[in-house]
Amino acid sequence: MTATDLSTGSATLGTAAQHATRSVPVCAPGDTIATVLNRMRGRRFDTAALAVVCEGERLVGLTTVERLLAARPDAAVSDVMDPDPPVVSPEAAQEHAAWTAVRHDEPGLAVVDEDRRFLGLIPAQRLMGVLLAEHDEDLARLGGFLGSASAARQATVERVPRRLWLRLPWLLLGLTGAMLSAGVVGAFENLLDRQVLLAFFVPAVVYLADAVGTQTETLVVRGLSVGVPVGRVALREAVTGVLIGLLLAAGALALTILFWGDLAVAVAVGLALLAACAVATLVAMVLPWLLSRLGMDPVYGSGPLATVVQDLLSILIYLATASAVVS
């Protein structure tokens, strides 16, 4: 079989096939070293670090160019080839392919089908690129970022206009939410005039609901960054949010009665905390997931957006509950 350039086949993203090339030296086991080297001269390959040894279309070995150059010119390729080189299937994950080559100390990796027919060779430089990309991604996941670590590093050195462009729209949305919150409070002005004590607990209800939502949001964003779908944590987080709301409601009920002695206000605060914490947990799970599905980074948007939504809902829940409970 003569040394030849084989055309590159189709590739599947993220698999060994994506990185394989057929533009490599190919020879038969019975070819002499001199013949193979002569065929390689004057030709361009994607990589010539390895010569592929085939019988027909079937891979039977690999040999390095160092072995070819060190061998006698009249020696056969079968004398210097590795008859059992590491191989991967075209569907193998790119990270698995790279680590297979590293563990076997090979400057390249052959891709074969189930009948061991040669489909291509992954050159060393592409294996290094895969390892670097996977390392970059692993660091990003450890840091709790979505995307790559390079993107996370880029975010830390961005110019001021870029920082404003990424952050300001969400904060302007927060400003709009603050105005809406003021309008909601104004709608219950008569209730607050009749029972001023209710106004004391607005910050407490809003803060606690935000705190519960922030905890859930952090957990969800971390999960998304390492490939954990929201569905895997949704039920447990929802139950946790309700239980936290119950515990905070019980504490608020007891403390309000103890320090202010108003049972109606205490009940209103307790019920509002229970409902607000449960709703905040739901909002904190849905928004990062939704932003991620829309191709937006939840790190920038989910915090301000969740705060706006949670604050509005918490105030509305609290004052609506108080209006129903307090005469």
Image (cartoon, rainbow, N blue to C red):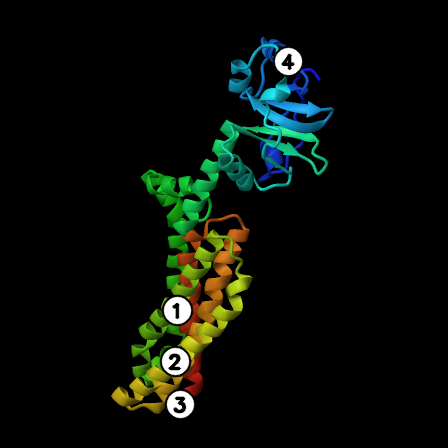
Going from N to C along the chain, the mark reached first, 4 or 3, is: 4
Give coordinates of residue 37: x percent, y percent. Answer: 59, 12
Helix, strand, or loop for circle 2? helix
CA separation in Å, label 2 and label 1: 12 Å
Residue that numbered label 4 is attached to: 32
Residue that numbered label 3 is attached to: 327
Residue 118 quadrant? top right
Front residue of 244 and 269: 244
Indicate which disc residue 212 carries: 1
Inspect this view and state whether residue 29 appears. yes
Q: Which of the two discs, 4 and 3, sits closer to the camera?
A: 4
Going from N to C along the chain, the mark reached first, 2 or 4, is: 4
Front residue of 292 and 33: 33
The three-letter code of the residue at mark 1 reads: Val
The three-letter code of the residue at mark 4 reads: Thr
- Residue 117, placed above or below residue 202: above
Q: Which of the two discs, 2 and 3, sits closer to the camera?
A: 2
Indicate which disc residue 57 carries: none
The three-letter code of the residue at mark 3 reads: Ser
Front residue of 258 and 128: 128
Indicate which disc residue 247 carries: 2
CA separation in Å, label 4 and label 3: 101 Å
